[in-house]
Image: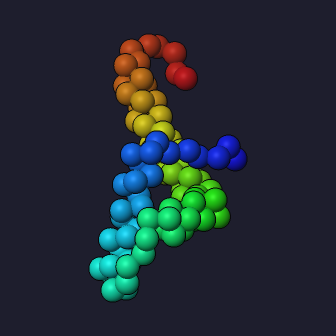
Amino acid sequence: MKPVTFSREETRAMVAEIQDYFQEELDQEIGSIPAEMLMRFFGERMGAYFYNRGLYDAQALVGKRMESLTDEVLALEQPTGHLR
C-alpha cells in the first residue's frame, strides 16, 4: 500500500485531536512530537484496516446503487410479444 501523506494542517489537526483525547480521557498531557509519533504509528500499523473498511463500505454502496440502476433500466423496458 502506498504510504498516506497528510498536509501540515491535517497533521496539526490530528495531533491536536490526540492531545485532546489524552487530556480528556486519560487526564494526561502529551506533547506534539509524541502525539505525532503516535499518529504515524497508528497510520503505519493500523491504517490499512481503516482503509480496507472504507473500501468495503464503498464497494457495498456501489453494489446497492448498481442494483438500483439495474432496476431502473429494466423499468424502462417496453412490452413486446416476445418473452425474454
- Residue 73 position, x and y percent, is 42, 23
Q: Camera-side residue: 3 or 7?
A: 7
Pinpoint residue 62: horizontal percent, then vertical percent: 48, 39
Left or right: residue 45 versus residue 69 is right
Q: Is residue 43 above or below residue 59?
A: below
Q: Is residue 78 among the parts visible in the rendering? A: yes
The answer to whether 45 appears left or right of 53 in the picture is right
Identify the residue at image location x=67%, y=43%: 2
Point 52% across, 21% down: residue: 83
- Count of numbered badges drawn on the protein: 0
Which residue in the rendered view is the most extreme toward the left? 24
**Coloring scheme of the render?**
rainbow
In the depicted structure, whether residue 62 falls above or below residue 16: above
Residue found farthest to the right: 1
Which residue is found at the position 46% from the left and 42% from the top?
7
Question: Relative to the observer, which residue lies in front, 50 or 84?
Answer: 50
Quadrant, the C terminus: top right
Query: Which x, y percent locates residue 30?
Result: 42, 75
Q: Quadrant of residue 77?
A: top left
Asked whether residue 67 is in view, the answer is no
How far across and down, in percent of the image, does residue 41 sit?
A: 60, 65
Q: Which quadrant would residue 52 be assigned to in this image?
A: bottom right
19 over 36 or under it: above or below = below
Q: Residue at x 37, y 79 (%)?
A: 29
